[in-house]
Image (spheres, helix red, strand yellow):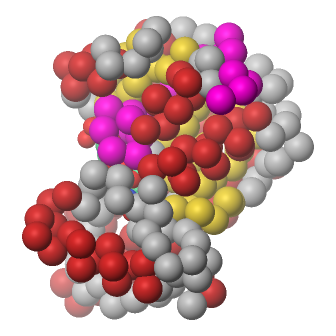
Amino acid sequence: MNQQLTGQRVLVVGGARDLGLAVARAVAAEGATAVVGARDAARAAAAAGTIEGAKSVRVDVTDEVSIVAALREAGPLDHVVVLASAHHNVPVTELDHDRTVAAFEAKVIGPLMLAKHTARGLPAHGSIVLFSGVAAWNPSPGYAVMGIANGAVAFAVQHLAAELAPVRVNAVSPGIVDSGSWDGLGAGKPAFLAQAAGGTLVGRAGSADDVTAAVVWLLGAGFVSGETIHVEGGARLR
Ligand SMILES: NC(=O)c1ccc[n+]([C@@H]2O[C@H](COP(=O)([O-])OP(=O)(O)OC[C@H]3O[C@@H](n4cnc5c(N)ncnc54)[C@H](OP(=O)(O)O)[C@@H]3O)[C@@H](O)[C@H]2O)c1
C-alpha cells in the first residue's frame, strides 16, 4: 500500500458486500475515508463498522431522491465508485419487462443519475468509476440483458468523461470473480469457477484483489479518462 488516496473521500455504492465491500476496504487501506453506500442503512452501517474510519449512507440508485439525500449526508467527495447491479439472466424469449428495466436502472440509469448529482461537486482531481463486465464482449445465450447493460456502461464512461471533464470517468470490466456473489451456486460454485477459469488466457477466475487493484489505480490515474479497464484474464480473447 502506498497511501495514494490519503485524505480523499470515496463513496462506494454497493459497498456493503461482495466486490463493493472489497473496494471500500481497499480504498481505506490506501488512506481514503470510505463512505459505504447500500440500499439498507443498517447493512451499510454494519459494513462501514468493519473498516477503520469509514462512514455509511443509504442509497438506492434507482431512486433519485435517495441519491440526493445520500450525497448530502456523505458530504464532500473526491471519488464515486458504483458497483450496483441487478441481474436478469434469462433467454430473450423469456424476458420480463420490469426486471429488464431494473437491470438497466441499476447499471446504467442509476449511475447516470449519480453522475448528474455528483459531477459539479467533485474536485478537478476527482473521478467516477463505474462497473461494466465481460458479458458485454462475450455474447452468450441467456445473458443478453447483462451483456447489453455492461456494454452501455463502456459507452457511458466515454460520454460522461467528455461532458464532465476535468472530472475523470472510467469503468472496470471484471471477468468472473469469486466475489461472494456466486456463493448462491452452493456445491455448483467450484465447477462454475473452473469453467470460468478455462475461458481465460491466464487459467483462473478473478479475485477481489484483482479488481480492487484496478479501481485503486484508476482513482489515482490522472491522465486516464473515458476508459474501460478489462480485468478478466483475457477472457474476451478466448
Ligand atoms: N462478480 C463477478 O463475477 C462479476 C463479473 C462481471 C461484472 N461484475 C460487476 O461487478 C459489480 C459488483 O459485482 P458483485 O459480484 O459484487 O455483485 P453483487 O454481489 O451482485 O452485488 C451487487 C451490488 O449492487 C448493489 N445494488 C443492487 N441494486 C442497487 C441499487 N438499486 N442501488 C444501490 N446499490 C444496488 C447491491 O447492494 P445492496 O447491499 O444494497 O443489495 C450489491 O452491493 C457489479 O456491477 C457486477 O455486475 C461482477
Q: Is residue 6 magenta?
A: yes
Judge whether 121 appears above or below 119 on screen. above
The quadrant holding residue 45 is top left
The magenta stretch spans residue 63: no
Q: Residue furthest right?
A: 223
Q: Position of residue 4 (x, y in %)?
A: 73, 25
Q: Is residue 17 left or right of residue 235?
A: left
Instruction: Please tell me which residue is depicted at 51% across the width and 72% down the height of the picture.
Output: 134
Residue 105 in view (yes/no):
no
Tag count: 0
Picture layout, residue 193 above or below residue 115: below
Residue ID at (41%, 61%): 177
Quadrant of the snapshot with the C terminus: bottom right
Residue 96: where, in percent of width, then height?
20, 72
Report x, y in % for residue 176: 42, 68
Residue 98 located left or right of residue 225: left
Q: Which residue: 19% across, 58% down?
A: 183
Question: Residue at coordinates 27% horizontally, 55% vertically from top-left?
Answer: 181
Q: Quadrant of residue 76?
A: top right
Residue 140 location, x and y as percent?
40, 88
Q: Is residue 42 visible?
A: yes
Q: Going by the picture, which residue comes out furthest to the left?
A: 187
Q: Is residue 235 above or below residue 127?
A: below
User: Which of the 4 quarters of the picture holds residue 178?
Assistant: bottom left
Quick one: quadrant of the N terminus? Answer: top right
Magenta segment, which residues?
A: 1-21
Q: In this rendered view, identify the residue nearer to me: 150 or 214.
A: 214
